[in-house]
Amino acid sequence: MADSSQVAPGARRAAIADELRRLEESAMYSAQMQFETAKHWRGVHLMLGIPTSLLAAVAGTTVLVESTGRVAAGVLALVSAGLSAVMTTVNAPQRMTHATACANAYLEVQTAARQTRTVDLPVLPVDEVRAVLTELTARRDEQNRTADPPGRRAYRRAQANIGRGGQTYAVDRGLTAISPDTPEPSGTTP
């Protein structure tokens, strides 16, 4: 590898810009996959939690209302207890919270990489920008170590979201965030 002091500053800035773009892309996909994973765990929690609660309520009501429904109430209570055990083992709320936290951490890396590339790279000394790149890469790598691996479905859904422009800001598409139907602020004349 060539000594960085022998590489022209323009070429080095271009290489850093390329690495920042790669970091942005990596963080963008990782964030989207973690958000999809969080949605999955939220769904699992609801799919297990609602029937568990309903079965427990029906079992309790059956015992109180009917004296002949004790066997049915017992079966419902056992099924409810079984679902509760599955919910405890799966721990979907904690997994959802962890996936959301990881996704937000990836978004922080993505935003910092984009801001460094578009705002700071042109004006900061090359060595300072290189230090920022190193720090952002370390943050992304730390997230990679702590995030649970996403499933295939989360991967496909993340790709679809990004493909539909789910990570594109209006300003990047040449649009303004304010609707053209928004009235002019008061006190201004056209």
Image: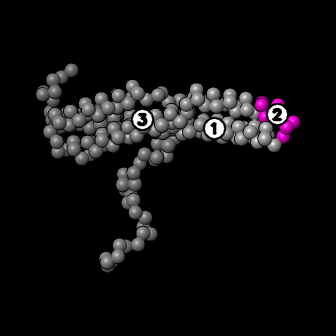
Among numbered discs 2 and 1, the one appearing first in the sequence: 1
Q: Residue furthest left?
A: 5
Q: Which mark is residue 172?
A: none
Q: Residue at x 64, y 31 (%)?
A: 84
Outermost right residue: 68
Q: Quadrant of residue 135?
A: top left
Element type at mark 3: helix
Q: Split into 4 quadrants, where in the image is the C terminus?
A: bottom left
Task: Give the residue type that dot 2 points to.
Answer: Arg
- Secondary structure of the residue carrying tag 1 is helix
Q: Position of residue 68 (x, y in %)?
A: 87, 36
* Most common SS among magenta residues: helix
Q: Amino acid at mark 1?
A: Gly
Residue under label 3, please give it: 102
Q: Relative to residue 91, is residue 30 drawn left or right?
A: left
In-front residue for pair 70/173: 70
Name the residue tied to disc 2.
70
User: In the rendered structure, does residue 40 fall within the stretch colored magenta?
Assistant: no
Q: Earlier in the sequence, mark 1 or mark 3?
A: 1
- Could you tell me which secondary element the residue under label 2 belongs to? helix
Q: Please report the residue visible at 34 percent of the width from the left and 31 percent of the height from the top.
A: 140
Q: Quadrant of residue 11?
A: top left
Q: Nearer the viewer, mark 2 or mark 1?
A: 2
Which portion, as a residue range, is magenta?
66-75
Is residue 63 toward the left or the right of residue 33 in the image? right
